[in-house]
Image (cartoon, rainbow, N blue to C red):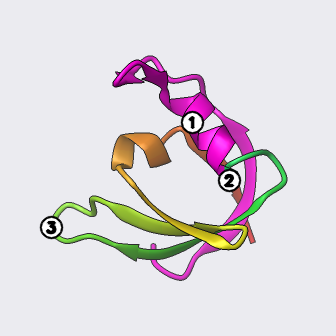
Amino acid sequence: MAGQSGTVIHLAPASQVDAGVDVARRLMELGFVPGERIRVLKRGMPGGDPIAVKVGHSTFALRRFEAALISIKPE
């Protein structure tokens, strides 16, 4: 939900490969690492795809299957 924030606690290994790149590894390279604070800014309509999130000082648009790989501890 928009406005929610938390801390990344785990990234699930992805079984999907996006253009030859492991999605979980790509997310880690972007800054989605355990201990990092994350905030949901907005969800797309309809269906909630993509999801705009802020991690560190950067903002990203994630597809729902990418966001589902990220486990967070709500604040």
Q: Earlier in the sequence, mark 3 or mark 2?
A: 3
- Residue shown at the point (63%, 49%) measured from the top left: 30
> Quadrant of residue 26 in the image?
top right
- When the figure is inspected, residue 62 is found, relative to residue 33, above or below; the finding is below
Q: Residue 21 at what x, y percent from top left? A: 47, 24
Q: Which residue is mark 1?
A: 26
Spatial CA distance of label 3 from label 1 is: 26 Å
- When the figure is inspected, residue 40 is found, relative to residue 27, above or below; the finding is below
Q: Amino acid at mark 3?
A: Pro
Residue 7 lies in the magenta stretch = yes
Q: Amino acid at mark 1?
A: Arg
Q: Residue 68 at what x, y percent from top left? A: 47, 43
In the image, taking residue 61 as reference, residue 9 lies left or right, namely right
Q: Residue 39 at what x, y percent from top left? A: 61, 72
Between 17 and 8, the one nearer to me in the picture: 17
Marks 1 and 2: which is nearer the front? 1
Looking at the rendering, the stretch of residues picked out in magenta corresponds to 1-30
Q: Which residue is mark 3?
A: 46
Labels 3 & 2 near each other (Cβ < 8 A): no
